[in-house]
């Protein structure tokens, strides 16, 4: 003001565009994490205002806020304005005309099943519609415990469960915006928050909380009657992951227990699904199939047995005394008699623009090339705006398409808009996932390459074109070896329809299916529930930890085959997580409380017990194994050699576990430029950051439980032979069932199941011969591979198997 500067020299638009372009790299800087202004402008429509750049230039007025910060008034006005600007959009959502019906139904009934297409507003609007209902207020009740009455608070909060953390966090942010409240930890007054594994954003006043299914199951260990909640909204039930099936069973048990631990106050349950499994779910909650002898569960088991993807089908079928399908009608009579009429249903009609689907005339040999061609064809021929969403089946293939699109985009003429290529898969860091939901910068088309994470649980705005590879990685339990493998497999028709629908959210769209029409018709109509095809060790441990001893008669929506239950029991027992009589042991209880897999949990406990106390080192390795691959997978031979040379300093001849330890410790000790360090060593900076975050949380949790002494430093370890042996022996305790021995012909055979397995080319032990190996993961591509491999001694394996007594009594356990 008042100066005579020549303002025309300043190209504000270019500066602004440049600032926005720099935003993602700024956000990834370590210092960004601690900045208090993050979130203050998240409600803005303006990408610049939402950025940290703006936060730096325009910090909130009251900058120095204490931990219990109170939002300055101008921010609350900004939040209100943003909420107001979203109102008309919210009113246009298909669910709006049903909200009253939903509220009324829940005044009378305890369960409502909502079926409505993705995007109809279930996840965002239903919690807001219910949070002020009279039954949603916290209540004080007196409960008799050990003959002494106690007054406890029940309810007051709504939990919405999501299968994935990215859905939980983005939904929480969105609903906070819509309600004009800051998100979780940003203010003690915030009413909306989230809680996902290794990350939580809640306040003492949180009333709407988005959680992952796993987190709610963990919470139930301390609060089995879910006293903190008035209602649980179970979202995305159509995905039928194993956790959601468990959750449904537990919720049904709470109702069956007449809400005793809640002082009789009903827990309202809203089950939300994008596909019409309404009758199955209604039948499940109305209780038929619960009464012994009505046989309904069994009849469904037999129907599913043919498609559950398990080996040894013959073994399973002989165990079941299911009814023939005609018996199911009798069961429906039970239902018709109305044993319990406590379930309401509601169907929400969709709001979807037409999407034309095209097929390839011939099967596609190379889906990366085919997608690349279509992406550039769209980009040259189709008008803007209109982003492209590609569905692929895994990180590796996503990254190869990502680098090809970037490479070709560099050669595009200046007349074409720019391309912004964004991968999207579950293991991606939060900041990288967030980018997908930001609007594209001006004159730019987004190309999002995703796994089936974007199929139903996330709404990626701006998409008008979908390319569907027709594949997804599907978990499959192989009972013969007692291990799970992830296989790329054809998707189901219902998945194909969901993928197609992603192109029609905002305008008419197009879906390019990279398979023939005949292939489409040969696909399974719907997905097989995960509980019928996964390793049940973790689910069973969860049940046992919650005091459920009879795992066969647990109220499953679909009962898993008995052989899978037996294998899992055996595995848990081998880990020392179960007692001789099948109850949970103290080790089992400890494992259940740890936010890692059963095998990694057992390893951590072994480390805390070990003489050398190598828990700090084991936490480091477990953190690396809990995130996506740290070492970038390189395709070009030249790069491979370069990477091998750069990583040589981490390489440990005992195998990949210790290599990971050296790598994470070297990264943590780097205090100048970690990103450059990662690049230099061909290590994924994204994955390393995630591993460091997991490490922080695991250290905190292990310190809290006394497993890790506060005196344990995070200094790089001096890897003496004693320490190396000690670490590997801890892993033996957790992974005894994932071991293989060298055979005279040079192959490796698994100790359980006697299957031939080769060391994966990504392992440092690839091509080496050692007497025995333990491995982290079993993968099946062209053949069976062991991934994440270390050399062990046969005597160690014997020790672990011998310390678990013969399993004669195990047969009677299930
Ligand atoms: O749960 P459902 O799939 O039925 O819908 P929703 O998640 O409640 O989303 C309703 C609408 O809100 C979507 O169509 C999106 O346009 C919008 N939304 C958004 O813009 N950002 C989010 N993080 C979530 C939803």
Image: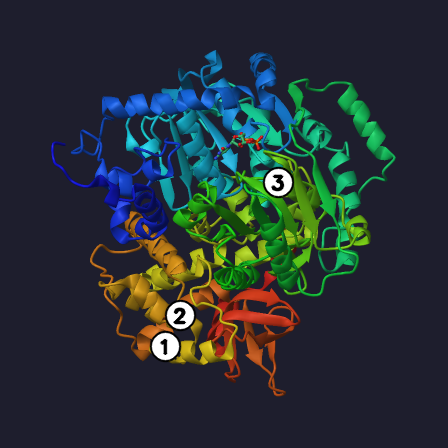
Q: Say whether residue 381 is visible.
A: yes
Looking at the rendered structure, the secondary structure element under dot 3 is helix
Looking at the rendered structure, the secondary structure element under dot 1 is helix
Give 169 or 610, whichever is nearer the viewer: 169
Q: Residues within 10 Å of mark 1 (few under 14, many from 20)?
A: some
The residue mark sitting in front, 3 or 2, is: 3
> What is the number of callouts on the image?
3
Q: Which residue is mark 1?
A: 646
In the image, residue 219 above or below residue 430: above
Q: Which residue is mark 2?
A: 682
Q: Say whether residue 737 is visible.
A: no
Sequence-wise, the earlier of marks 1 and 3 is 3
Q: Position of residue 217 (x, y in %)?
A: 49, 39
Relative side of 76 to 790, left or right? left
Q: Residues within 10 Å of mark 2 (few under 14, many from 20)?
A: many
Give 360 or 175, whichever is nearer the viewer: 360
Residue found at x 41% / y 76% = 643
Give 345 or 654, whichever is nearer the viewer: 345
Relative side of 362 to 284, left or right? right
Mark 1 and mark 2 residues within 8 Å of each other at the beta carbon = yes
Mark 3 and mark 2 residues within 8 Å of each other at the beta carbon = no
The residue mark sitting in front, 1 or 3, is: 3
Alpha carbons under labels 3 and 2: distance apart:
35 Å
Q: Quadrant of residue 669?
A: bottom left
Q: Residues within 10 Å of mark 3 (few under 14, many from 20)?
A: many
Sequence-wise, the earlier of marks 1 and 2 is 1
Q: Which residue is mark 3?
A: 502
Looking at the rendered structure, the secondary structure element under dot 2 is loop
């Amino acid at each position: 003001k008042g100066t005579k500067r020549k303002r025309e020299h300043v190209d504000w638009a270019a500066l602004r565009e440049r600032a926005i372009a720099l935003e993602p790299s700024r956000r990834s800087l370590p210092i960004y994490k601690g900045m208090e202004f993050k979130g203050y402008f998240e409600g803005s429509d303006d990408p610049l205002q939402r950025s940290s750049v703006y936060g730096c230039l325009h910090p909130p007025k009251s900058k120095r806020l204490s931990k219990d910060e109170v939002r300055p008034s101008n921010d609350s006005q900004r939040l209100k304005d943003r909420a107001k600007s979203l109102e008309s959009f919210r009113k246009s959502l298909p669910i709006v005309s049903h909200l009253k019906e939903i509220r009324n139904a829940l005044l009378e009934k305890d369960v409502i099943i909502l079926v409505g297409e993705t995007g109809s507003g279930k996840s965002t609007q239903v919690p807001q519609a219910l949070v002020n209902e009279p039954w949603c207020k916290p209540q004080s009740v007196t409960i008799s415990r050990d003959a002494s009455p106690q007054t406890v608070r029940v309810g007051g909060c709504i939990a919405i469960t999501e299968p994935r953390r990215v859905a939980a966090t983005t939904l929480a942010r969105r609903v906070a915006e819509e309600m004009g409240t800051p998100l979780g930890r940003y203010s003690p007054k915030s009413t909306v928050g989230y809680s996902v594994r290794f990350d939580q954003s809640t306040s003492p006043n949180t009333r709407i909380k988005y959680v992952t299914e796993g987190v709610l199951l963990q919470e139930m260990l301390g609060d089995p009657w879910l006293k903190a909640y008035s209602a649980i909204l179970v979202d995305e039930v159509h995905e039928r992951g194993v956790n959601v099936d468990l959750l449904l069973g537990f919720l049904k048990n709470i109702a069956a227990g007449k809400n005793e631990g809640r002082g009789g106050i009903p827990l309202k349950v809203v089950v939300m699904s994008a596909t019409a499994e309404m009758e199955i779910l209604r039948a499940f909650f109305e209780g038929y199939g619960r009464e012994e002898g009505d046989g309904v569960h069994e009849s469904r088991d037999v129907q599913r047995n043919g498609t559950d993807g398990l080996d040894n089908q013959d073994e399973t079928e002989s165990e079941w005394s299911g009814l023939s399908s005609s018996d199911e009608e009798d069961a429906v009579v039970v239902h018709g008699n109305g044993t319990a009429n406590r379930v309401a249903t509601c169907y929400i009609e969709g709001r979807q623009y037409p999407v034309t689907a095209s097929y390839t005339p011939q099967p596609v040999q190379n889906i990366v090339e085919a997608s690349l061609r279509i992406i550039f064809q769209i980009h040259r021929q189709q008008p803007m705006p209109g982003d492209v969403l590609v569905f692929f089946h895994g990180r590796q293939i996503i990254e190869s398409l990502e680098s090809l699109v970037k490479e070709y985009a560099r050669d595009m003429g200046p007349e074409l808009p720019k391309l912004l290529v964004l991968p999207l898969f579950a293991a991606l860091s939060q900041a990288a996932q967030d980018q997908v939901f930001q609007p594209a910068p001006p004159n730019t088309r987004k190309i999002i390459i995703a796994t089936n994470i974007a199929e139903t649980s996330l709404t990626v705005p701006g998409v008008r074109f979908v390319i569907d590879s027709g594949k997804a990685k599907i978990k499959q339990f192989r009972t013969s070896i007692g291990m799970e493998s992830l296989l790329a497999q054809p998707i189901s028709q219902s998945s194909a329809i969901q993928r197609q629908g992603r192109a029609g959210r905002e305008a008419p769209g197009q879906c390019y299916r990279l398979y023939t029409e005949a292939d489409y018709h040969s696909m399974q109509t719907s997905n097989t529930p995960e509980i019928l095809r996964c390793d049940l060790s973790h689910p069973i441990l969860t049940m046992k930890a919650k005091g459920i001893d009879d795992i066969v008669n647990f109220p499953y929506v679909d009962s898993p085959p008995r052989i899978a239950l037996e294998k899992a029991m055996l595995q848990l027992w081998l880990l020392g997580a179960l007692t001789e009589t099948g109850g949970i042991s103290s080790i089992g209880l400890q494992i259940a409380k740890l936010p890692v897999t059963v095998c990694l949990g057992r390893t951590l406990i072994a480390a805390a017990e070990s003489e050398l106390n190598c828990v700090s080192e084991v936490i480091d390795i477990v953190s690396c194994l809990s995130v996506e691959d740290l070492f970038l997978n390189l395709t070009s031979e030249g790069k491979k050699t370069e990477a091998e040379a750069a990583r040589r300093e981490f390489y440990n001849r005992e195998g990949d576990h210790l290599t990971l330890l050296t790598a994470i410790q070297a990264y943590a000790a780097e205090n100048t430029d970690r990103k450059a360090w990662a690049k230099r060593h061909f290590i994924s900076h994204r994955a390393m950051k995630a591993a460091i975050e997991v490490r922080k949380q695991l250290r905190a949790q292990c310190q809290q439980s006394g497993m890790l002494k506060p005196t344990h430093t995070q200094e790089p370890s001096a890897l003496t032979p004693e320490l190396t042996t000690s670490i590997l022996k801890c892993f033996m305790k957790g992974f005894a069932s994932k071991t293989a021995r060298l055979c005279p012909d040079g192959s490796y055979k698994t100790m359980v199941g006697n299957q031939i397995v080769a060391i994966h080319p990504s392992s440092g032990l690839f091509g080496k011969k050692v007497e025995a190996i333990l491995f982290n993961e079993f993968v099946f591509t062209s053949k069976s591979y062991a991934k994440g491999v270390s050399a062990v001694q046969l005597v160690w394996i014997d020790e672990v198997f011998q310390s678990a007594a013969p399993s004669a009594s195990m047969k009677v356990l299930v």
